[in-house]
């Protein structure tokens, strides 16, 4: 299967719907489920996982985990993505769902949500098992979703080596990554039953192609064939096409979220500390505080919505108490004296001040940006911005392109980004030898 990553258009296929053994291509789905779990707060990349005996017993390729060993989730993710470690993949499955069968069930639910209708998973690692089958079409679909749904993790698949805590591990796909121009992922797979499999993605200019091959006779023959498929894709697509991202599957708490096992998590409750001796608030004070708060909330809820007319008055928010002692009306060195309850809430009706809003951001804290160079003309800067946006679709798709003119030239900037988004975009552009600096809100 050969596909234009940008649009999802199939450029070439042969036997793409034949159900075959995917081998370690399976780990693409294992990692997709892990990224989904992290996204929705089931666990974090720093969650410490206790290795179960089932994971430690997996055959190679493996990281060398031992039963009862503790390791952060991020290192298991790296080992599964780069080293294709079977013990790491199994540990991830147990950590999220508690058993291999429960995790496989979640993998299959996710596969259906992604439209992978000819895929059945039986385990998290991809070692040969009766009924554990997929197709070239489904794996291409999964690779495209990994790229668009979790761009912040996609760089894992292009790392030649990475730190997996126990040791530094090398990428099973390093030969292809080094040999093919623009290659930056995704995943290899091999078993005797499957042969040599590969899902590969590469970018050249504004074009990005993804190709999948099953059943190669050797690593060299597989890499050569996939290079031909990618070349075919690049030759058939135009430089510019409309971007059509795949729809991210819905997440249903209680159905998708499994019961996290073997993980050291933060406590479910965080009780408030007790007050120091002598400063306990009497029950009647708490009742008075509750009544005051209830009266304030009721008054705010009954104020009519602002319409621009003089009678649409605004109720000022109640003042914030500095401490619990102040809230209760207690003096540090005096008796408890409750503050009088207000008889009424007076609303001022002064005409609202006119404010000119230049730009409204609804995405929250999007005051950061990046600069990708200074150029002699506005045309050059705009051209670089467009090329860069198409090169780094995952992190720059929602950023605004802006050319800033000064006496020194035309700065090509992306703005309207979060701090983390700007940092991630710069990391990925720098890895492609594209000049990039972050712009803070004061820039």
Image (cartoon, helix red, strand yellow):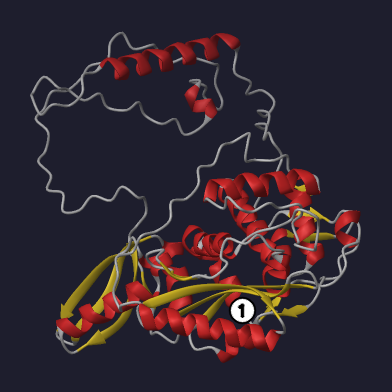
Identify the residue at image location x=40%, y=60%.
418
Is 128 situated left or right of 5 in this image? right
Q: Position of residue 267 (x, y in %)?
A: 71, 39
For disc 1, the neighbor class at 10 Å (few under 14, some 14 to 19, many from 20) is: some
Give the camera-side residue of 80 and 1.
1
**Does 245 sit above or below residue 156?**
above
Position of residue 188 measured from the top left corner of the image (x, y, whole percent) = 67, 74
- Above-or-below relation of 341 to 56: above
Q: Quadrant of the C terminus?
A: bottom left
Q: Nearer the viewer, residue 376 or 92?
A: 92
- Say which of 368 and 256 sits in front: 256
Identify the residue at image location x=22%, y=87%: 375
Q: Quadrant of residue 32?
A: bottom right
The quadrant where residue 190 appears = bottom right
Which residue occupies the foreground of this view, 288 or 364? Answer: 364
Find residue 336 and report its horizontal and vertical position in percent: 54, 16
Visible residue check, residue 443: no
Q: Secondary structure at mark 1?
A: loop
């Amino acid at each position: 299967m050969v596909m234009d990553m940008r649009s999802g258009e199939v450029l070439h296929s042969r036997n793409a719907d034949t159900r075959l053994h995917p081998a370690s291509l399976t780990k693409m789905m294992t990692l997709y489920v892990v990224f989904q779990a992290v996204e929705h707060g089931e666990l974090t990349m720093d969650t410490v996982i206790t290795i179960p005996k089932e994971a430690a017993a997996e055959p190679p390729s493996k990281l060398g985990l031992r039963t009862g060993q503790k390791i952060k989730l991020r290192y298991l993710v790296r080992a599964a993505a780069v080293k294709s470690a079977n013990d790491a993949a199994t540990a991830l499955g147990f950590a999220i769902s508690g058993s291999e069968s429960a995790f496989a069930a979640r993998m299959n639910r996710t596969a259906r949500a992604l439209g992978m209708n000819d895929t059945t998973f039986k385990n998290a690692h991809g070692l040969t098992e009766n009924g554990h089958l997929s197709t070239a079409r489904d794996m291409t679909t999964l690779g495209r979703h990994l790229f668009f749904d979790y761009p912040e993790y996609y760089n894992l698949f292009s790392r030649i080596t990475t730190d997996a805590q126990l040791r530094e591990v090398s990428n099973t796909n390093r030969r292809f990554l080094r040999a093919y121009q623009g290659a930056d992922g995704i995943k290899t797979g091999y078993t005797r039953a499957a042969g040599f499999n590969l899902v590969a993605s590469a970018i050249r200019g504004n074009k990005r192609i993804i190709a999948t091959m099953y059943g190669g006779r050797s690593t060299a023959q597989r890499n050569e064939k996939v290079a031909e498929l990618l070349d075919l894709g690049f030759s058939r697509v135009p430089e510019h096409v409309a971007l059509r991202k795949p729809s991210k599957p819905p997440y249903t708490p209680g159905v998708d979220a499994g019961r996290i096992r073997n993980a050291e998590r933060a406590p479910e409750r965080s009780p408030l500390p007790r007050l120091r001796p002598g400063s306990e608030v009497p029950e009647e004070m708490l009742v008075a505080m509750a009544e005051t708060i209830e009266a304030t909330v009721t008054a705010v809820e009954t104020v009519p919505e602002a319409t621009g007319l003089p009678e649409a008055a605004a109720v000022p928010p109640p003042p914030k108490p500095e401490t619990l002692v102040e809230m209760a009306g207690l003096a540090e060195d005096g008796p408890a004296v409750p503050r009088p309850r207000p008889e009424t809430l007076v609303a001022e009706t002064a005409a609202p001040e006119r404010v000119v809003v230049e730009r409204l951001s609804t995405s929250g804290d999007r005051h950061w940006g990046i600069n990708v160079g200074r150029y002699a003309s506005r045309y050059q800067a705009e051209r670089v911005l467009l090329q860069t946006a198409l090169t780094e679709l995952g992190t720059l798709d929602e950023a605004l392109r802006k050319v800033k003119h000064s006496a020194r030239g035309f700065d090509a900037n992306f703005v309207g980004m979060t701090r983390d988004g700007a940092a991630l975009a710069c990391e990925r552009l720098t890895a492609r030898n594209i000049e990039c600096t972050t712009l803070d809100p004061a820039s």
